[in-house]
Amino acid sequence: MKSSKITQRIAALILLLFMITANGQTRHKSNSSLLALETLNLITFFNTLNTYPNDFYKGEMTLNDGSILIGHFSLNNSSTDNYVVLHDDGETYHYYCKDEIKDVMLYNPNSVNNTIFEFIKDDGKLYRKVYDNNKDVIVYDTANYPFDNTLVDQVIIDVDNQLIETWNFWTSGPKHDLIKYLRDRDNIRYKRSQFKSLDDIFEKL
């Protein structure tokens, strides 16, 4: 166990040095002391996490005070009993906790529709909004990235502001969890072959 943690920290250190050095080559050519300080701050931060950061994606984050931050964001990095969002604004790196954040929007390079991440539970984690009928049904999953047409891990349905967990041990993935939810709700034995895409499932919601 101890050697595994050491390996994780070494991997995190190498990754962070690579990330920050790469940014420093283009953004801090004349300010090596600032780069060194950023490196030290992030290494210290991730040593407390015992892990390495999730991927960064271009987007914007709205804070609770109404201000909007632009740049690249890494979501849901676990820090003790909280989750944090890392922000690279092109000059330096910062991290933000739930109490500071309203929501995060990541720009989707494959779609004109950007992807919103919101807090829907008390666990301090941002959930990706994958479907919203603008009436009474919203679907979330636990992905940390902005891309469409996939579901990741746990899927949660918000029906009239009531959260419904769809995860089931006996299904083989989040898409099938949604189909099982429809079967239970409608008391109809829908076949998987009836749903060629996620959009077909969403239409039933």
Image (cartoon, grey):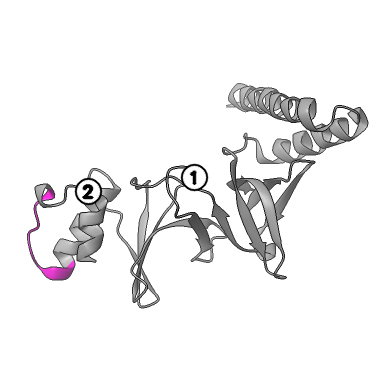
Mark 1: secondary structure: loop
Q: In x, y percent, where is residue 163?
A: 38, 69
Label 2 crowd (10 A; few <14 / some 14-19 / many >=20) = few
Residue 109 x, y percent position in the rendering: 48, 43
- In screen coordinates, is 9 left or right of 184? right
Taking 42 as reference, is 2 above or below it?
Answer: above
Secondary structure mostly seen in the magenta stretch:
loop
The vertical placement of 97 against 35, above or below, is below
Looking at the image, can residue 120 be seen?
yes
Mark toward the start of the polypeptide (1 vs 2): 1
Q: Kindly indicate the quadrant of the structure image that contains residue 21.
A: top right
Say the numbered circle drawn on residue 157.
Answer: none
Q: Which residues are magenta?
A: 185-192
C-alpha gap between disc 1 and disc 2: 20 Å
Nearer the observer, 115 or 48: 115
Residue 7 x, y percent position in the rendering: 62, 22
Using the rendered view, name the quadrant where residue 139 is placed: bottom left
Q: Nearer the viewer, residue 43 or 39?
A: 39
Q: Which residue is mark 1?
A: 145
Image quarter (top left, top right, bottom left or bottom right) of the C terminus: bottom left
- Marks 2 and 1: in contact by CB < 8 Å? no
In magenta segment, residue 84: no
The kind of residue tagged 2 is Ser
Dot 2: what SS?
Answer: loop
Residue at the (19%, 57%) spot, across then down: 180
Q: Position of residue 56 (x, y in %)?
A: 60, 40
Amino acid type shown at disc 1:
Tyr
Image-quadrant location for residue 12: top right
Badge 2 is on which residue? 197
Image point (22%, 63%), residue name: 203
Q: Residue at x 55, y 56 (%)?
A: 105
Is residue 188 located in the magenta-colored stretch of the structure? yes
